[in-house]
Image: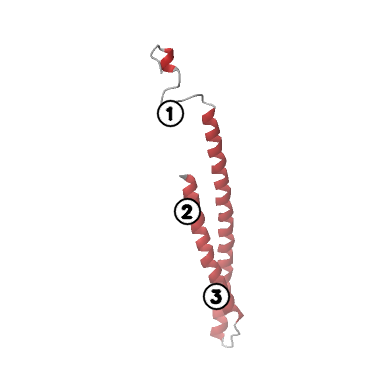
Amino acid sequence: MLEAIADEMLMRVVATQAVVYRAREQLDEVLNLQWESPAGRAFRDRAAELASKVADLDARLETARGEIWAARADLAEIEASMLSGLTTLGPVSMPGGLPIGLLGGLGLGN
């Protein structure tokens, strides 16, 4: 269940990164234009501020993506540890069942 949540988070981060990438492309196009009017230059300056914030968001998303991958690896390790621990508990006929041989020890047979 936790891995499914991590997968969903990862998919959302990747989708958001795609949108951010497109926004960065569009802002770069605006920044490359030559503005002759004061209003145009002011617009370019605001676009540059926004581009900086979008770049920061992109870096944060990449960090989050790495953290989610690390969390998935941790979850897989915990799951493997739990599964290997189950084999050391001893023989059990089925989850929630009685240990094999218990009824035989009581004279009731298996």
User: Which tag is nearer the camera, tag 1 or tag 3?
Assistant: 1
Could you say whether the residue bearing mark 1 is in a helix, strand or loop? Answer: loop
**Screen quadrant of the N terminus:** top left
User: Which tag is nearer the camera, tag 2 or tag 3?
Assistant: 2
What amino acid type is highlighted by mark number 3? Gln
> Looking at the picture, how far across and down is residue 87, in whole percent?
53, 29
**Chain-order first, disc 2 or disc 3:** 2
Residue 88 location, quadrant? top right
Q: Residue at x 49, y 58 (%)?
A: 12
Q: CA distance from mark 1 to mark 2?
A: 32 Å
Local crowd size for mark 1, using a 10 Å CA cut-off: few (<14), some (14–19), many (≥20): few
Local crowd size for mark 3, using a 10 Å CA cut-off: few (<14), some (14–19), many (≥20): few
Q: Residue furthest bottom?
A: 36
| Residue 86 vs residue 67, the one in the foreground | 86
Residue corresponding to mark 2: 8
Residue corresponding to mark 1: 94
Residue 55 location, quadrant? bottom right
Callout count: 3
Q: Can you tell which mark lies on residue 71?
A: none
Q: CA distance from mark 1 to mark 3?
A: 59 Å
Q: Can you tell which mark lies on residue 26?
A: 3
**Up-down relation of residue 31 to residue 9 (above or below):** below
**Chain-order first, disc 1 or disc 2:** 2
What amino acid type is highlighted by mark number 1? Met
Could you say whether the residue bearing mark 2 is in a helix, strand or loop? Answer: helix
**Chain-order first, disc 1 or disc 3:** 3
Q: Residue at x 56, y 85 (%)?
A: 38
Q: CA distance from mark 2 to mark 3?
A: 28 Å
> Looking at the picture, how far across and down is residue 105, in whole percent?
44, 13
Q: Are marks 1 and 2 in contact (CB under 8 Å)?
A: no
| Residue 98 vs residue 21, the one in the foreground | 98
Q: Are marks 1 and 3 in contact (CB under 8 Å)?
A: no
